[in-house]
Amino acid sequence: MDMKDKKATLLILLFLVGIVVLAMVFQSSSSEDGGTMLKVYIRKVTKEKDGVVFEVYLKNEGSEEMTFYCGKPMMFVEVRDTRGNLVGVYPRTVLDVLIKVTLKPGETYREEVRMKLPKGTYRIRAFAELSFDSKYKNPIKIWSKSQTVLV
């Protein structure tokens, strides 16, 4: 192998390593615990006569302003029974709009998610679906921690 082939091989290896590193960074931004400074929380669960209301928050926990794009609603709640079977993802209706949101450090974006569930115990977790691209390419989901609720 001559020097030209060695340089070409080295460039290809560096390129592949760069892709792997970018994939790891991008993947961590949509994980439950992290990589991104945007975090999702379920702050309040209210039982009402005709259902349950979840207050879901997306908070910028970083030190810099963050701008992203999302649909309406941006926040969803995934509901599973005690065996882990998916009951549903709420809300079920999504508007076909694209919203630009900018959060300063410490700011939160809040949405209420309402649903009707039969009496029982459920495992829930919320997620925000958003993109850092103005054309909404490569959207990510940022998940809250799972919690148990009794309806």
Image (cartoon, rainbow, N blue to C red):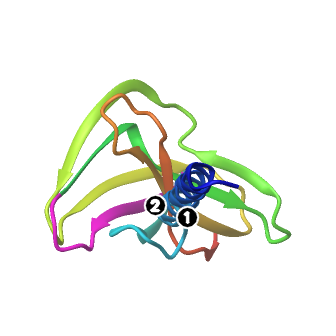
Q: Which residue is mark 2?
A: 54
User: Which quadrant does the C terminus fall into?
Assistant: bottom right
Considering only vertical position in the picture, is 47 above or below 139? below
Q: Residue at x 23, y 38 (%)?
A: 100
Residue 21 in the image: x percent, y percent? Answer: 52, 64
Instruction: Give SS at disc 2.
Output: strand
Magenta stretch containing residue 74, yes or no? no
Given the current orientation, which residue lies at the most extreme right position? Answer: 83
Name the kind of residue labelled 2 in the image.
Answer: Phe
Considering only vertical position in the picture, is 27 above or below 39? above
Q: Which residues are magenta?
A: 51-65
Query: In this view of the protein, which residue sits in the foreground, 61 or 134?
Result: 134
Left or right of 119 on screen, residue 70: left
Between label 2 and label 1, give the one nearer the viewer. Answer: 1
Give the mark nearer the N terminus: 2 vs 1.
1
Q: Residues within 10 Å of mark 2 (few under 14, many from 20)?
A: some
Residue 120 in the image: x percent, y percent? Answer: 74, 68
Residue 65 in view of the camera? yes
Q: CA distance from mark 2 to mark 1?
A: 31 Å
Magenta stretch containing residue 61, yes or no? yes
Residue 102 in the image: x percent, y percent? Answer: 18, 50
Given the current orientation, which residue lies at the most extreme front position? Answer: 2
Q: Which residue is mark 1?
A: 24
Considering only vertical position in the picture, is 139 above or below 11? above
Query: In this view of the protein, which residue sits in the foreground, 21 or 32?
Result: 21
Q: Residues within 10 Å of mark 1 (few under 14, many from 20)?
A: few
Instruction: Give SS at disc 1.
Output: helix
